[in-house]
Image (cartoon, rainbow, N blue to C red):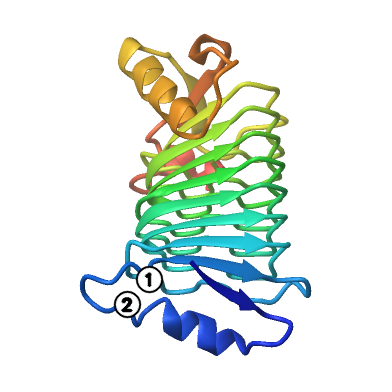
């Protein structure tokens, strides 16, 4: 395992090392000591590496991750796992605004709470939040799954496309074109899979409600003008 102390090592040296993996090498495990909450840690990973960050991180940690496994032993600032492609990102604490924004794949697990706009414009990413989420989460969510074990703030799923939302707690309000939907057997099976992958073992999928698009805003219709 290679260890980087960001108190003494430039961040660019770490991010360069994550891309310079020689074929056949065993140098794929990294530990990052981050006492100052540096920004843009482990950005742009495109290798099957494992990164353990000791301490909280600033904005854009693990952005554009494609195949890496990143664990933050602390909290994360805005934009964690933004535009993620594949792999896994785990935040042991809380996450700030727009966690998993525009994510196209992979799994983001937040073991604390997530702030506003969690999963905004999600495009295939799966997000599991052990706590609660803030307002405008999953805004314009196109595909993927957002699982929330706690509560959801105002305007959940506003202008939603085909992302599937599962909330165990209370929802303060639903956004435009977002409605509660039937929880069918295939949804329970997928939810069980996501909970297992996120390390949730003491919660049943039957405790959740499912929310999705009413599909009235796909094309402009004067009868629905007030919903825009």
**Along the line of sight, the residue nearer the viewer: 41 or 50:** 50
The residue carrying mark 2 is: 21
Q: Is residue 149 depicted above or below 160 in this figure?
A: above
Residue 61 in sight from this viewpoint: no
Q: Residue shown at 53%/30% (left/top)?
A: 199
Q: Residue shown at 73%/30% (left/top)?
A: 172
Q: Residue shown at 21%/75% (left/top)?
A: 23
Q: Residue shown at 49%/27% (left/top)?
A: 211
The answer to whether 201 appears left or right of 213 in the picture is: right
Sequence-earlier tag: 1 or 2: 2
Q: Mark 1 touching mark 2, by CB under 8 A?
A: yes
In which quarter of the view is residue 85 placed?
bottom left
Q: Nearer the viewer, mark 1 or mark 2?
A: 1
**Where is residue 45 shown, x and y percent of the image?**
40, 70
**Along the line of sight, the residue nearer the viewer: 63 or 152:** 63
The answer to whether 20 appears left or right of 109 in the picture is: left
The residue carrying mark 1 is: 27
Dot 1 lies on which element?
Answer: loop
The answer to whether 48 appears left or right of 95 in the picture is: left
Q: Is residue 45 depicted above or below 67 in this figure?
A: below
């Amino acid at each position: 395992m290679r260890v980087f102390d960001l108190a003494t090592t430039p961040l660019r040296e770490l991010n360069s090392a994550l891309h310079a993996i020689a074929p056949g090498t065993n140098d794929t495990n990294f530990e990052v000591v981050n006492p100052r909450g540096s920004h843009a840690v482990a950005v742009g990973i495109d290798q099957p590496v494992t990164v353990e960050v000791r301490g909280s991180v600033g904005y854009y940690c693990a952005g554009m991750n494609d195949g890496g496994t990143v664990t933050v032993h602390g909290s994360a600032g805005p934009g964690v796992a933004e535009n993620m492609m594949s792999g896994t990102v785990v935040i042991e604490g809380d996450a700030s605004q727009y966690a998993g924004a525009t994510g196209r794949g992979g799994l983001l697990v937040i073991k604390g709470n997530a702030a506003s706009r969690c999963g905004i414009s999600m495009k295939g990413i799966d997000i599991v939040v052990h706590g609660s989420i803030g307002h405008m989460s999953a805004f314009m969510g196109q595909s993927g799954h957002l699982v929330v074990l706690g509560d959801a703030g105002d305007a959940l799923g506003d202008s939603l496309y085909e992302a599937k939302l599962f909330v165990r707690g209370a929802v303060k309000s639903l956004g435009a074109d977002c409605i509660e939907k039937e929880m069918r057997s295939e949804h329970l099976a997928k939810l069980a899979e996501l909970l297992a992958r996120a390390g949730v073992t003491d919660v049943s999928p039957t405790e959740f409600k499912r929310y999705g698009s009413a599909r009235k805003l796909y094309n402009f219709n004067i009868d629905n003008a007030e919903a825009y």
